[in-house]
Image: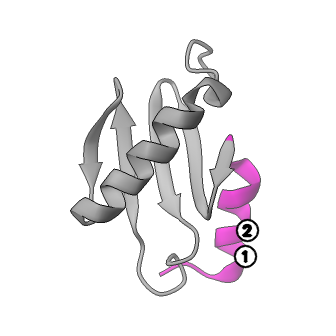
Amino acid sequence: MKTKDEIQQIADKADMIVNGYAFTNKNGWIHVLNLNCAAKEIHSAVIYNDKIAETNMDDIEISIVMDYYNKNKNLLELDKVS
């Protein structure tokens, strides 16, 4: 579980937030956190090469996250290494 302050820090550092999901690009590895659940139970995923590399999300949430990612990935500046 994360505190409100921790959730706020994650949101502030995110490269993109779509419908409550924070997407952060770390050298091509896209870290996703469901900000709406973080205070109770952390729902997160890691995307690499446009595929889920690791997650604790269920199949429906993965589908939602990948849809948001695929529609907005140009905003993450994937060719830029931070």
Q: Is residue 5 left or right of residue 40?
A: right
Q: Position of residue 80 (x, y in %)?
A: 62, 15
Name the image quarter holding residue 4. bottom right
Label 2 sits on a secondary structure element that is: helix
Q: Is residue 13 magenta?
A: yes
Q: Residue at x 68, y 40 (%)?
A: 15
- Residue 56 can be seen, yes or no: no
Residue 2, placed above or below residue 51 = below
Q: In the image shown, does 62 or 31 lie closer to the viewer?
A: 62
The boundaries of the magenta stretch are: 1-15
Q: Is residue 28 left or right of residue 6?
A: left
**Residue 5: which numbered mark, if any?**
1
Residues at circles 1 and 2 in contact by the CB criterion of under 8 Å: yes
Distance CA(mark 1)–CA(mark 2): 5 Å
- Residue 33 can be seen, yes or no: yes
Judge the density around disc 1: few (<14), some (14-19), many (≥20) Cα neighbours within 10 Å.
few
Residue 49, placed above or below residue 54 = above
Q: Residue at x 54, y 83 (%)?
A: 39
